[in-house]
Image (spheres, rainbow, N blue to C red):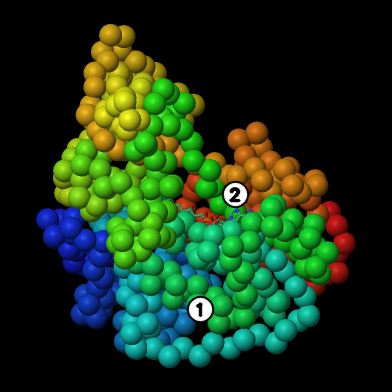
Amino acid sequence: MPIKERTEMPVQDPKERIKNFSQVALGYTEEMALNEASRCLQCKNPTCMTGCPVAVKIPEFIKLLKEKKYQEAIDKIKETNNLPAICGRVCPQEHQCEAKCVLARRGQPVAIGRLERFVADWEHSHGKSEVRKAEPNGHRVAVVGSGPAGLTCAADLARLGYQVTIFESLHAPGGVLIYGIPEFRLPKDVVRREVEYVKSLGVKIETSVVIGRTLTIDDLFHDGYEAVFVGSGAGLPMFMHIPGENLNGVYSANEFLTRINLMKAYEFPEFDTPIKRGKRVAVVGAGNVAMDAVRCALRLGAEKAMILYRRGREEMPARAEEVLNAEEEGVEFHFLTNPVRILGDDKGWVTGVECIKMQLGEPDKSGRRRPIPIPGSEFVIEADTVIMALGTSPNPILAQTTEGLKAHPWGGLIADEKTGRTTRPRVWAGGDAVTGSATVILAMGAGKQAAKDIHEYISSGAQGW
Ligand SMILES: Cc1cc2nc3c(=O)[nH]c(=O)nc-3n(C[C@H](O)[C@H](O)[C@H](O)COP(=O)(O)OP(=O)(O)OC[C@H]3O[C@@H](n4cnc5c(N)ncnc54)[C@H](O)[C@@H]3O)c2cc1C
């Protein structure tokens, strides 16, 4: 039998969307969702679920959706996933559940993420799911960081009756979901809505508290917390260490995106955080963060928004869909191009980037072909703003301030892959703080595993490991 075509998601026209920060992907209508749900074969052995780190009961929720039982469908997802509207928008499903869908073997997989988004949004506009708080079990757990790892760990423990407090260094909870991923991919109202849901389960969130500075992990134990989960992410930006990197107009992608997303710099002066609205913006790097930064620069009014990447198109780490979106919006890609110096005027403002042409040699440790500079091929690209999107690493502050908590030389905390147990008894860790920059769903999976292990540990009355 021929496989029905996958239902396309309507999107904003590229010419229009580069003038605003509203969502690019507009979501399924009810008719589209029902049509897409009808493609699910309801496999007896649902391989899609093996691709989901938080084990969403995918065929069950899709069956309920097909029967138009939308509230039941979202309740089914929430049995294991506390952040469905977020996951439905930003999870790389093509590498997770959808990659394991049996339809993917012969054509296009069921659009599981889009269906998840549909029911999550349906609940927001129609539903009234009752939140039942668990009976308190008398145990207290502290969570460091309110990104997807911390929120998931906290929510799962709260459901088991733990009194959980999340300590967050920024003034708003959500981690990268709130400060990194742009509004046009993940509206901040959606993040706030799902953070409120986690709070409704009984989780307390204390913002503007830097663990390792305002309080230490030892202070938390003295305050009576019996376990600590560290989900502090990987927010420390990397730089190239080339001349000119401290000129005015050079940003790390982190700062650039935080100003725009968390502090709404694009609404300056209504919001009080300014940002330089560059006319010629060069973003160095070609991962998802680079795509987000370059697309934000366009929306701020850049006439030329460029990606400078030392390897070729094939080696770009960004998701194909994000590259396509950027191309549709008019982003220019300069491949095999590596900055060697940032140029500035006598007032210290960026005027351009001196680059060198590269060629690809043998594959390196990452399996990608190594870029090698071509001597004498230097040239200048004019730019008034340069954004470094070269990756991030975990901040060493927690390992430095916590006795017995060990980290790898690159910054990631050492933790057991299955349980999240660190080298310090009663301290668990997961998400980007352990793996380095990865994905929302992997961070959530780590938070979930740690919550399970914390529960097993505390309920067994164990004292150390
Ligand atoms: C721009 C950008 C776009 C991305 N796009 C996607 C995407 O589309 N899909 C996807 O799956 N992944 C994406 N990612 C990756 C994904 O967001 C991360 O892998 C994920 O957020 C990691 O979750 P986490 O909870 O481990 O850490 P984070 O989300 O980084 O949260 C950690 C939190 O801990 C807080 N914190 C840190 N130190 C302390 C401390 N000492 N005390 C108290 N609080 C502290 C931080 O302020 C932060 O709020 C993107 C990342 C970026 C930067």
Badge 1 local density, few (<14 within 10 Å), some, or many (20+)? some
Mark before the other along the chain sequence, 1 or 2: 1
Q: Residue at x 32, y 75 (%)?
A: 118
Q: Residue at x 68, y 73 (%)?
A: 164
Return the residue found at the far top.
376
The residue where tag 1 is placed is 197
In the displayed structure image, the side of residue 434 where residue 184 appears, left or right: left
Q: Mark 2 is on which residue type? A: Ala
Badge 2 local density, few (<14 within 10 Å), some, or many (20+)? many
Measured along the vertical axis of the image, is residue 322 above or below residue 384? below
Residue 368: image x %, image y %? 40, 28
* SS under mark 1: helix
Number of marks present in the image shown: 2
| Front-lying residue, 170 or 277 | 277
Label 1 – label 2 distance at C-alpha:
24 Å
Residue 460: image x %, image y %? 83, 69
In the displayed structure image, the side of residue 351 where residue 411 appears, left or right: right
Residue 140: image x %, image y %? 75, 73
Q: Mark 1 is on which residue type? A: Tyr
**What label does residue 433 carry, if any?**
2
Mark 1 lies within 8 Å of ligand 1 (Cβ measured): no
Measured along the vertical axis of the image, is residue 185 above or below residue 380? below
Q: Residue at x 50, y 59 (%)?
A: 175
Q: Quadrant of the N terminus?
A: bottom left
Q: Quadrant of the C terminus?
A: bottom right
Instruction: Please say whether residue 22 is visible from this viewpoint.
Output: yes
Measured along the vertical axis of the image, is residue 461 above or below residue 334? below
* SS under mark 2: helix
| Front-lying residue, 64 or 106 | 64
Mark 2 lies within 8 Å of ligand 1 (Cβ measured): yes
Q: Residue at x 72, y 43 (%)?
A: 400
Q: Residue 284 occupies which quadrant of the picture?
A: top left
